[in-house]
């Protein structure tokens, strides 16, 4: 009650911020007449003046009003667009490092120029982040006219650019690019072998367009750079043949009553958790089939240690057949399986699902199965974007996720008022019993709009659904345009026409991002297409452009008279944001508009969360076929289901982040160390420290600190030095000759000899030549062991939740063991670098250079790299218990393999009076037991 009273008295936090920003808008408006009098050169000179003031110590906040006034005036001259007052408010929120929620059509692209210009004055670079390459290129060219007019340079960071082009793009004052490309460039910069190969500079200020799509929808899985691993392609093809032999169980058994199974089977599908589980009979049947195929030896079971990988691949095949569907989750193009982004409907070229899922889908579709990949580097969007000194974002739908933005990114959401009041009418949902009834109602609604000349945008949940609806409209002889992942190249052209009277546009979620739908058609976009047409001469182009502009006004007035753009949703999305994004396409800048969602009880969201309840209501009311429920109660039930899904997805993202935070700290330390090595001219000091640490550990293994001579194993130490470092030192005779020798003297003697031998190698070829070789060995070793460490963390992560059965906190256990693994990795690097540099045979300068080049070539031969941002359900989430247990056992087997450090001591415990395991015949306490 007191909080409500104070809010009424002082206004909400959002209202207080808006009041504060409006005071600045008044100051900016007061400057407008003054800047209107300046010539273009004088206006451009303001940028130089601002930069000098910032360099002299003036803060950006102090020049905000002047800078915004300059951008507004520049916009009027370069773009023929004037920033509205509410756009000024949005710009202030972005500069303050907040998220500006602005309705669709309010001009977010133009708003971004205010904060970008102001923050670019510091000369540290500004990154504008978009959801796809098309928008990055479009916005860089469009808004670039304004930046260049004001004297700033603009770069575009696209995939597959050369290193020089990328460096030029990042060196610009303003850089446009996609979230994936920025993240991959960061990872690639930490894999280079020369400082000149880096492309990024410091991460200063990032402005994210469609911030909810990037920081929430795409943040459920990490970015991964991977190289080829072992080849199991034949196995996928064989297991693909097993799946059709297994039957799906219908219904789920109640653990108390034992009832609920409608049709017994070999596996169950849990659509909520997106998992497949083998039943007890399914395990037996799978074992029998695999035995017949010769994939498991007679008498062995599915969960024998040797068959663990087989279980994993079998589950991948089951999921590929039962959870991943063509034209919904992926498309097949050019003999390849290409993922479709479930949030935007766009094709994700070059992306692959992890954990063998992509290979299983390839086997299912009968295309060439590509090799599995090994992770070389990875980072989550959360941890990448949190490295920026300042982060801001803009979108039409952020308020429903305001808590997550604040919790994860420390970003406050500010709702910016519209320039004109919205006139869109959002009708209640209509729910039908079956998909066929729903489709008929959708077609009737579209037919009615078409007959009146009202433009319609139909939003579908998948490519499959959009093509099905297109067939229905074709049979009704209704002309329409289809916009889905298969028509990606025509996206802008189709959306530009979606507001013309009588136009019917069917779209997956991708239409909701980035391109404005203007009633009467986007005349500017149409003019651009005419100007770009090389088949027309200049006179014809001018004639067509003039005709278009005169025709547009009458089309615009007609569309408004018929009620504006009508939005038809054919199903509810998992997220309220995506639905709001679709609705927001209508009613821009105070235009009229309307929206309605048509649902059926067969829709995934209804079937999983609300179907039985609503179906019961319909049956009790004895509703005839074709009749729909239209009630606020149903709409609220659906939104409640969406909130459940959103909460679950938030938990997935938060859990991913909590686990990634552990490796993120390690990643920061490793990359910091790697960059220090890369930037230094020589690494002799670091190598000397590693050598001293490695030799000290080796000596202390056989001559423990502060120990008696009886506890020393000098012959074993001599043998270890000979085998590992190729150094012969007569320690035994020296110790016997001098009774005063201590363990410290032994260490000094060994270290002195090792350093002398090492210096002799350096002197042989000269310090400059050997320094390059040292650096290459150090970087190579760091990269190799970091890759193995990432693989070990993956295995650890997959099975760690089983610790919960032992009443242990899995996250704490993960942190503890990851820390131990990291320590072991650093020890392995130290020992390998020392061993490599001590045992290398170099006789001449030419051979030293040749050895360095060979190592560098080996490092750069990590070809066939894949850049992955797996789709949210692509095998990155918690597996089911049986599968996870299998993976945990696989992790133990993998940890015992060469090159992977093992956390658990695998040696049996030996009693002090037992025979020593080394085979000497002595008691343990008199042999190796003395060392402990």
Image (cartoon, rainbow, N blue to C red):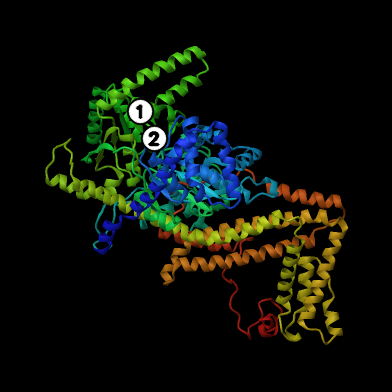
Q: Earlier in the sequence, mark 1 or mark 2?
A: 1
Pick the front one: 473 or 921: 473
Q: Position of residue 857 (x, y in %)?
A: 72, 47
Label 2 residue SS: helix
Q: Residues within 10 Å of mark 1 (few under 14, many from 20)?
A: many
Q: Position of residue 486 (x, y in %)?
A: 43, 32
Label 1 residue SS: loop
Q: Is residue 106 shown to the viewer in this render?
A: yes
Q: Position of residue 97 (x, y in %)?
A: 46, 51
Pick the front one: 355 or 877: 877
- State the residue position of label 1: 498
x 62%, y 56%: residue: 671
User: Looking at the rendering, in which quadrant would you find the N terminus?
Assistant: bottom left
Looking at the image, do the residues carrying marks 1 and 2 touch, with CB atoms under 8 Å apart? yes
Q: Is residue 834 shown to the viewer in this render?
A: no
The label shown at residue 771 is: none
Above or below 860: residue 815: below
Instruction: Kindly indicate the quadrant of the structure image that contains residue 918.
Output: bottom right
Instruction: Kindly indicate the quadrant of the structure image that contains residue 667.
Output: bottom right
Left or right side of 920 for 805: left
x 81%, y 56%: residue: 770
Above or below 76: residue 642: below
Q: Position of residue 312 (x, y in %)?
A: 47, 54
x 71%, y 79%: residue: 920
Q: How many marks?
A: 2
Above or below 128: residue 701: below
Left or right side of 117 for 325: left
The Cα atoms of the two marked residues, 1 and 2, are separated by 10 Å
The label shown at residue 511 is: 2
Above or below 776: residue 806: below
x 41%, y 58%: residue: 407
User: Looking at the rendering, in which quadrant would you find the C terminus?
Assistant: bottom right
């Amino acid at each position: 009650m007191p909080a409500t009273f104070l809010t009424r008295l002082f206004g909400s936090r959002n209202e207080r911020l808006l009041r504060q920003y409006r005071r600045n808008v008044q100051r900016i408006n007061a400057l407008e007449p003054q800047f209107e009098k300046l010539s273009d050169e004088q206006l451009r000179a303001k940028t130089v003046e601002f930069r000098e003031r910032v360099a002299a110590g003036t803060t950006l906040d102090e020049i905000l009003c002047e800078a915004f006034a300059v951008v507004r005036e520049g916009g009027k001259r370069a773009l023929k667009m004037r920033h509205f007052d509410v756009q000024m408010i949005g710009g202030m929120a972005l500069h303050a490092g907040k998220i500006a929620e602005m309705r669709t059509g309010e001009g977010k692209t133009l708003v971004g120029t205010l904060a970008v210009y102001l923050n670019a004055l510091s000369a540290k670079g500004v990154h504008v982040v978009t959801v796809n390459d098309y928008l990055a290129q479009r916005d860089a060219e469009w808004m670039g006219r304004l930046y260049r007019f004001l004297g700033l340079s603009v770069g575009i960071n696209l995939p597959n650019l050369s290193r020089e082009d990328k460096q030029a793009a990042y060196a610009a004052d303003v850089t446009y690019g996609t979230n994936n490309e920025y993240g991959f460039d960061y990872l690639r910069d930490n894999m280079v072998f020369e400082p000149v190969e880096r492309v990024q500079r410091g991460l200063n200020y990032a402005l994210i367009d469609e911030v909810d799509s990037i920081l929430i929808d795409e943040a459920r899985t990490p970015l991964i750079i991977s190289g080829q691993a072992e080849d199991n392609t034949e196995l996928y093809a064989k297991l693909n043949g097993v799946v059709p032999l297994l039957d799906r169980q219908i219904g789920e058994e109640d653990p108390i009553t034992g009832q609920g199974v409608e049709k017994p089977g070999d596996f169950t599908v849990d659509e909520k958790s997106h998992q497949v589980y083998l039943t007890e009979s399914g395990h037996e049947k799978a074992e029998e089939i695999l035995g017949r195929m010769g994939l498991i030896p007679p008498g062995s079971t599915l969960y024998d240690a040797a068959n663990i990988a087989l279980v994993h691949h079998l589950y991948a095949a089951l999921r590929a057949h039962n959870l991943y569907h063509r034209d919904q989750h992926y498309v097949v193009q050019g003999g390849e399986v290409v993922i479709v982004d479930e949030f935007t409907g766009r094709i994700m070229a070059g992306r692959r699902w992890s954990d063998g899922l992509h290979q299983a889908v390839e086997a299912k579709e009968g295309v060439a199965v590509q090799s599995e990949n090994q992770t070389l580097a990875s980072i989550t969007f959360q941890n990448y974007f949190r490295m920026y000194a300042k982060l801001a974002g803009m979108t039409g739908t952020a308020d429903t996720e305001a808590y997550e933005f604040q919790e994860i990114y420390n970003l406050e959401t500010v709702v910016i008022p519209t320039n004109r009041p919205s006139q869109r009418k959002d009708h209640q949902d209509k729910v039908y019993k079956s998909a066929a009834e729903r489709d008929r109602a959708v077609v009737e609604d579209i037919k009615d709009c078409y007959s009146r000349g009202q433009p319609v945008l139909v939003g579908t949940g998948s490519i499959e659904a959009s093509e099905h609806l297109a067939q229905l409209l074709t049979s009704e002889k209704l002309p329409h345009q289809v916009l889905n992942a298969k028509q990606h190249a025509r996206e802008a052209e189709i959306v530009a026409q979606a507001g013309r009277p009588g136009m019917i546009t069917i779209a997956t979620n991708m239409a909701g991002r980035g391109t404005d739908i203007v009633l009467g058609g986007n005349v500017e976009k149409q003019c651009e297409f005419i100007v770009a047409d090389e088949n027309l001469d200049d006179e014809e182009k001018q004639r067509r452009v003039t005709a278009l502009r005169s025709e547009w006004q009458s089309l615009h007035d007609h569309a408004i008279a018929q009620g504006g753009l009508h939005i038809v949703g054919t199903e509810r999305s998992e997220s309220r944001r995506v639905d709001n994004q679709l609705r927001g396409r209508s009613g821009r800048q105070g235009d009229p508009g309307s929206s309605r969602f048509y649902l059926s009880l067969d829709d995934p969201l209804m079937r999983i969360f609300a179907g039985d309840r609503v179906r019961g209501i319909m049956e009790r009311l004895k509703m005839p076929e074709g009749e729909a429920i239209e009630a606020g109660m149903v709409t609220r039930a659906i939104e409640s289901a969406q909130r459940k899904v959103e909460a679950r997805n938030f938990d997935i993202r938060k859990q991913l982040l909590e686990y990634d935070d552990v490796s993120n700290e390690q990643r920061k330390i490793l990359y910091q160390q790697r960059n220090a090595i890369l930037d230094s001219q020589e690494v002799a000091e670091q190598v000397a420290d590693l050598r001293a640490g490695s030799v000290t550990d080796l000596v202390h293994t056989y001559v423990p600190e502060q120990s008696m001579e009886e506890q020393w194993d000098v012959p074993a130490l001599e043998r270890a030095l000979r085998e590992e470092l190729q150094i012969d030192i007569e320690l035994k005779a020296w110790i016997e000759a001098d009774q005063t020798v201590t363990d410290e003297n032994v260490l000094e003697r060994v270290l002195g000899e090792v350093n002398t031998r090492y210096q002799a190698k350096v002197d042989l070829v000269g310090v400059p030549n050997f320094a390059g070789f040292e650096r290459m060995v150090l970087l190579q070793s760091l990269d190799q062991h970091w890759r193995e460490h990432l693989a070990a963390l993956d295995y650890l992560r997959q099975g760690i939740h089983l610790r919960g059965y032992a009443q242990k906190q899995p996250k704490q256990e993960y942190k503890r063991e990851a820390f131990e693994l990291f320590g072991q990795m650093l020890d392995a690097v130290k020992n390998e670098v020392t061993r490599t540099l001590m045992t290398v045979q170099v006789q001449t300068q030419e051979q030293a250079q040749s050895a360095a080049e060979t190592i560098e070539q080996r490092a750069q031969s990590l070809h066939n790299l894949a850049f992955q941002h797996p789709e949210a359900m692509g095998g990155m989430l918690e597996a089911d218990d049986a599968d996870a247990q299998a993976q945990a056992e696989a992790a133990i087997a993998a940890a015992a393999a060469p090159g992977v450090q093992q956390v658990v001591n695998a040696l049996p415990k030996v009693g002090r009076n037992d025979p020593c395991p080394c085979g000497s015949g002595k008691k343990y306490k008199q042999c190796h037991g003395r060392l402990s």
